Image (cartoon, rainbow, N blue to C red):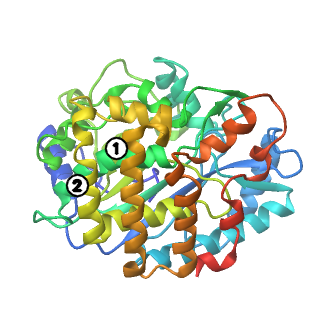
Amino acid sequence: MSDSVSDCTESRSAVTEAEVEALIRGICFKTGPPRFLGVEVEWLVRELRSPRLPVPPERLEAAYAALRMLPLRSRLTVEPGGQLELSSSPAASLMECIGSVSADLDAVRAVLREADLGLTGMGQDPWHPPTRFLHEPRYDAMESYLDRTGPEGRAMMCSSASVQVCLDAGYEEPGPLGHVRRWWLAHLLGAVLVAAFAHSPMAQGRPTGWRSTRQSLWTAMDPGRACAPPLDGDPRAAWARHVLDAPVMCVRAPNGGAWDVPEAMSFRAWTRSGAPPDREDLDYHLTTLFPPVRPRGHLELRMIDAQPGDDGWIVPLAVTTALFDDAEATEIAYRTVKPLAERAGSLAAPRNPLWLAAARSGPADPELREAAITCFEAAAEALPRLGATPEVQGAVAEFIDRYVARGRCPADDLIDVHGRADTPGPIDRDHGTEHLLHRKDIRT
């Protein structure tokens, strides 16, 4: 479940505009009973002894070479700025997913400790400017393209980290677990998840004014790449149009050559050109689209900041899974977020007023706070029905007590300390939920 391969194409032949539309409509929303889920967890890599110092590239290279030798169930990849990502295999249950990823993270941390390195869960690097670690033709081209519209794209590439929850698209038929309802729900509930799990209030040593600086990056980027398609029609048709009309970021070159970065060419225009793209080009184009919810056969929810603590990622995974895969909880969530649609208005996420409020204010926003309380309580009640262990249920309950019920989010812990002065504080010791999420028994 990583960006290196799209789930929406199969063979390697040239594609026409009609073929692209038919392919996306047929494959990017694979409907059926919600049976599988997954998670992609991204981490900033830090020096254990001096967390604010950047890790030299040669130390990262050596550590990642050792990590690639591990027999992991998850797919291990490295992001352009050196962030580490684990992408789980599809799991048949919440606890299966938690157990497999936790075991992989234990193995990864053991190797990193030998190199005096560790993992930090934050949505945005709070200290260092964006610095690229990977120097490959595709990232050279990506950086060149994103730099045209401002510095936000480079910061996204090199300084951000997230927890991405992957869920089945849902039934073909209407109802609480139908794919149309789940698609719509993801884009309104997504704002509540942004607010509740916001954890990136700083950049380059200073507060930014956003609870989720990471989310603010998406609002400033090219809307054709970072925004959702319209939600007022059939999801398949809307996504197909969105893919075709989105600008092409880059055109691959053979044999390691420099990739071309075209000016204002949509994928639709490319299919109509004298040198049309093939299916591998379509594969790559799909990975360069960064909407808050991305259909890849399953739904990939991309809006949640990386969380504090070794196991902080478990709470958003558990809450999100409960709100989508438990019929009772998803009905409560739907009724709760439906009134928020008026506030969102006609603008696409994440640029509409609802999503902007979530990123800037978090659950300090009264409407988002009330919605979060109701949705998190519904998720907590659903977790036993999904087979969650008492430890996972307890972690969610403690997150509700510590943050949601108080109109706070993990970012507020950082603001409390670093909003005043540049002094050592919780940011250097995995603050916040570490007291409840470092226990091994939460994972089994």
Residue at the spot x=61%, y=71% of the render?
102
- Specify few, some or many for label 2: CA neighbours under 10 Å numbering under 14, 14-19, or 20 or more: few
Q: Position of residue 71 (x, y in %)?
A: 64, 74
The residue under label 1 is 286
Q: Label 1 vs label 2: CA separation?
A: 32 Å
For residue 83, side relative to residue 302 (left or right): right
- Vertical side of 255 occupied by 262: above or below: above
* Quadrant into which the N terminus falls: bottom left
For residue 364, side relative to residue 176 (left or right): right
Q: Amino acid at mark 2?
A: Arg
Q: Amino acid at mark 1?
A: Leu
Q: Position of residue 127 (x, y in %)?
A: 73, 33
Residue at the spot x=38%, y=48% of the render?
370
Q: Position of residue 314 (x, y in %)?
A: 54, 65
The residue under label 2 is 335
Element type at mark 1: helix
Q: State the residue in front, 421 or 286.
A: 421
Residue at the spot x=46%, y=70% of the render?
89
Q: Which numbered tag is attached to residue 199?
A: none
Residue 354 shows in this picture:
yes
Q: Position of residue 115 (x, y in %)?
A: 85, 58
- Specify few, some or many for label 1: CA neighbours under 10 Å numbering under 14, 14-19, or 20 or more: many
Instruction: Please report whichever mark, 1 or 2, sits nearer to the chain's N-terminal start.
Output: 1
For residue 213, side relative to residue 297 (left or right): right
Q: State the residue in front, 83 or 439.
A: 439
